[in-house]
Structure formats: structure tokens, C-alpha cells
Image: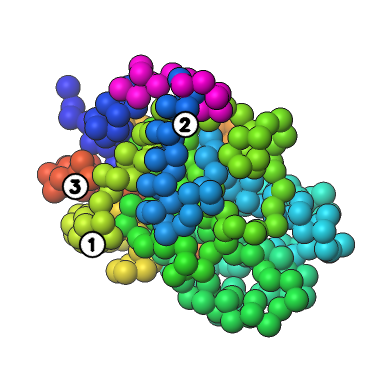
């Protein structure tokens, strides 16, 4: 049997055994509803309060600024729909949002939908050919009606690391003089492992994170909402999560989320893990770049996430490449949105404006802490064969 090499860590990560154990232990003992007033409820409550405080500390927030959700898709929807709904109700007839053309679908499609309702105007900033967007371009896009800026911290597809701190700083100066402050949201799902998510230093008002991208469980995420942020709820029906997100909490998920965050370690430890992973990334990039048919998507060096490799194999078919990789033991991903059998390049790949007319297979390889140099060598061998075909 071929050895399996998992290189799809941006899609999801294997759960850490210590996380799974913490969840199982918790679930068996602390089954109470954390919103109940009896002892079973309150002991579960104490555990999730502790977990919330740990997650808050990781991003330098207050515990009550963390709202647990079913994942990042919900958190992104909550941030966008909630802020826009509140702005429309409270102050504006016309609402403008600044975002990028390389957001995750849960941001991109939510804004596209609201645009189709003709209740908002949206500026989708195009990246340069390398997939980067400058802070000054974000600031220049602001109009009198702008209520929200939503910029992904690290692209899940092409690995661009966007200048969140610089945008936050510039916005702080603008908001200091503004009548209606502009809110700043970032989808930091792919940034949590290796980057500094300090909400004060980055000056963000809303931030999305998700547990299953950091060796935690699926089905649990969080939205950081700075105290005092004008935002409506996404759902109605209960007073949980400080009245902002109804429904009984996914308590084992919360425990697992906090454990996964704990295991990420200090910023120094995360930065040193990033350096180790970047060596593997750069080996993949340099070896595969030797093939004329392989064209790297996204930036290089510090502007690229340490765990992301994405390139197009010109003339190849995405689905065929994916199935050949899978047969050879490699779990990778394609940057294509498969719609009824036809593999079209995703909106992110299209935004790079490079290969729209040329047939090409997009291959994304995303590394995790379990990957070794021998995994990378094996992946290079397999992909080299494909690139020669
Ligand atoms: N944002 C980004 C950047 C992502 O990579 C993902 C997962 N692909 C999501 C949001 C959605 O996350 P979840 O699966 O937790 O809903």
C-alpha cells in the first residue's frame, strides 16, 4: 500500500491526540448544559469560562469579547451581516464595504449576495500578480459611506500574508477624526498558527478564527467582537454567548478549541515552528519551479504563509491531477471550484489575472506539523512526474 502524505492542512488538520483526550474526558464528566443553574450546568460553565479566557488571552482580548460559533463560516457571516444590518438600521441609507478579491467564499459570497439585494456597495480590491494587496490601497478605497473593511489575514488558497497591522494603524488615525468610525474585520483562520493575532496591536474590531485549522475539532470557531461594536445578531432564539449567539454551546468543542490554542505555544514557539515549515515550503517551491509548466501562484518569502504552496500546471486538467496525486498517496487540493463536473479556477486564482485563457490545473499543497522532509521529497517526485507528462 502506498504511504499516505497529507498535504491539505489548509482544508483541515488532523486533530491532536491531546485535544481529542481533553474533549472526551470533558464530555463524559461535564455533560450539563452550561446555561443551567444546577451544579451539573455550573461545573460545565466553569470549564467553558476558563476555555474562553484562554482563547481571549491568546488574542489579547477580554473573555466577553469571544463569541463561540459553529466555525469560521458562521463567524464571517455574523461579522458581515451583523455589522451591515446594524449600520443600515442605525445610521445609513447607503452602506459601502471595502474587501479584497481573494477572500474566503464565506466572505466573498456573503457580500456578493448582499450586493444583489442592492443594500450595499462593495469594493473588491484586486491583488497584484503575486497576490498581494497594499494597506494604502485599502485606505484609498474608503468613501464617505464606508462602514466596514474586511480583509483576510492569510489567504487560504495562495498564502498571501496581508498587511493587517498596517491597515489597522492607518484606520486608527482615520477613525480618530471620523463621525462614524469604520469597523475593521479580519478572517484570521489561516493566520492563527504562525502569526501574531493581538487584536490591540492589530487594531481590529472583529476577527474570525476556527479550531479545525489548528489541530482542534471541527464545528467550533469564534468571532472576536470588540466591546461596544455596533453589530446585530445573526440568529434569534436565546440569550447564550452574552445574548449574541443563541443555542446551547458546543461545550466539548470549546474545550478542544482551547486545548488546541494552548498547544500552539507562545509567539516565539510559533515563529520558530513557522521557520521550520517554511524550509519545507521553499524546497517544494524551488524544486517545482524548475519545470516550465509549473507556475507559482502567490507571493514568496515573508509575504507568503510558511505552510502554503500553490501552483498551476499549465495544460493539465485539475481533476485528473488531483486523482493521480491521490492514487500516488498524496492528499492535496485544487484551487478550483468544481461546478457540475467542470473545474473552473476559483475567484482567487482568477483575481491574479494570469491564466484565465489557458487551461491549467491548480494544485495547493499545505503543510502541517506532522510533515517531514521525506514527505516533501516524495511529493516532489510524484508532482515532477505529472509535470513531465
Ligand atoms: N476562512 C478561511 C480563510 C478558511 O480557510 C476557512 C476554511 N476553509 C473558512 C473561513 C471556513 O472555516 P470553517 O470550516 O470553520 O467554517
The picture quadrant where one finds residue 228 is: bottom right
| Alpha carbon distance from label 1 to label 2 | 32 Å
* Residue 42 among those drawn in magenta: no
Can residue 117 be seen from the camera position used here? yes
Q: Which residue is mark 1?
A: 268
Mark 2 or mark 3: name the one nearer the start of the chain: 2
* Secondary structure of the residue carrying numbered label 3: helix
Q: Crowding near pointer 1: few (<14 within 10 Å), some, many (20+)?
A: few
The residue drawn where x is 53% and y is 35% is 70
> Does the numbered disc 3 mark a residue whose Cβ is under 8 Å from ligand 1?
no
Q: Quadrant of the C terminus?
A: top left
Bounds of the magenta span?
25-39
The residue drawn where x is 72% and y is 48% is 232
Q: Which residue is mark 2?
A: 45
Kindly check if marks 2 and 3 are in contact, taking CB atoms under 8 A apart as contact: no
The residue drawn where x is 53% and y is 73% is 167
Amino acid at each position: 500500500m502506498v504511504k499516505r502524505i497529507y498535504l491539505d492542512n489548509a482544508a483541515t488538520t488532523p486533530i491532536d491526540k491531546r485535544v481529542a483526550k481533553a474533549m472526551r474526558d470533558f464530555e463524559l464528566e461535564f455533560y450539563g448544559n452550561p446555561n443551567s443553574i444546577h451544579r451539573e450546568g455550573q461545573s460545565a460553565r466553569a470549564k467553558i469560562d476558563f476555555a474562553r479566557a484562554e482563547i481571549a488571552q491568546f488574542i489579547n482580548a477580554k473573555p466577553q469579547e469571544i463569541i463561540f460559533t459553529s466555525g469560521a463560516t458562521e463567524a464571517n457571516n455574523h461579522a458581515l451581516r451583523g455589522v451591515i444590518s446594524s449600520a443600515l438600521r442605525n445610521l445609513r441609507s447607503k452602506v459601502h464595504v471595502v474587501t479584497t478579491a481573494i477572500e474566503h467564499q464565506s466572505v466573498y459570497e456573503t457580500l456578493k449576495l448582499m450586493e444583489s439585494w442592492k443594500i450595499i456597495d462593495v469594493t473588491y480590491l484586486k491583488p497584484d500578480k503575486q497576490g498581494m494587496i497594499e494597506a494604502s490601497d485599502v485606505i484609498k478605497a474608503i468613501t464617505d459611506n464606508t462602514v466596514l473593511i474586511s480583509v483576510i489575514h492569510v489567504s487560504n488558497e495562495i498564502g498571501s500574508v496581508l498587511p493587517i497591522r498596517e491597515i489597522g494603524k492607518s484606520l486608527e488615525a482615520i477613525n480618530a477624526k471620523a463621525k462614524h468610525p469604520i469597523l475593521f474585520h479580519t478572517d484570521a483562520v489561516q493566520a492563527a498558527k504562525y502569526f501574531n493575532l493581538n487584536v490591540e496591536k492589530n487594531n481590529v474590531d472583529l476577527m474570525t478564527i476556527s479550531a479545525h485549522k489548528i489541530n482542534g475539532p471541527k464545528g467550533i470557531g469564534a468571532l472576536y467582537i470588540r466591546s461596544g461594536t455596533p453589530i446585530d445578531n445573526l440568529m434569534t432564539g436565546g440569550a447564550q454567548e452574552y445574548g449574541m449567539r443563541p443555542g446551547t454551546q458546543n461545550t466539548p468543542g470549546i474545550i478542544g478549541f482551547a486545548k488546541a490554542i494552548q498547544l500552539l505555544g507562545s509567539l516565539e514557539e510559533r515563529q520558530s515552528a513557522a521557520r521550520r515549515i517554511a524550509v519545507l515550503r521553499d524546497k517544494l517551491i524551488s524544486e517545482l519551479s524548475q519545470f516550465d509548466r509549473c507556475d507559482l501562484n502567490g507571493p514568496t518569502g515573508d509575504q507568503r504563509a510558511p505552510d502554503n504552496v500553490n501552483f498551476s500546471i499549465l495544460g493539465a486538467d485539475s481533476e485528473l491531477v488531483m486523482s493521480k496525486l491521490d492514487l500516488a498517496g498524496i492528499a492535496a487540493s485544487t484551487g478550483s471550484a468544481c461546478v457540475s463536473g467542470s473545474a473552473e479556477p476559483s475567484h482567487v486564482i482568477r483575481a491574479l489575472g494570469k491564466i484565465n485563457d489557458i487551461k491549467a490545473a491548480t494544485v495547493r499543497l499545505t503543510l502541517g506539523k506532522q510533515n517531514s522532509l521525506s514527505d516533501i521529497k516524495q511529493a516532489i517526485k510524484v508532482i515532477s512526474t505529472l509535470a513531465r507528462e
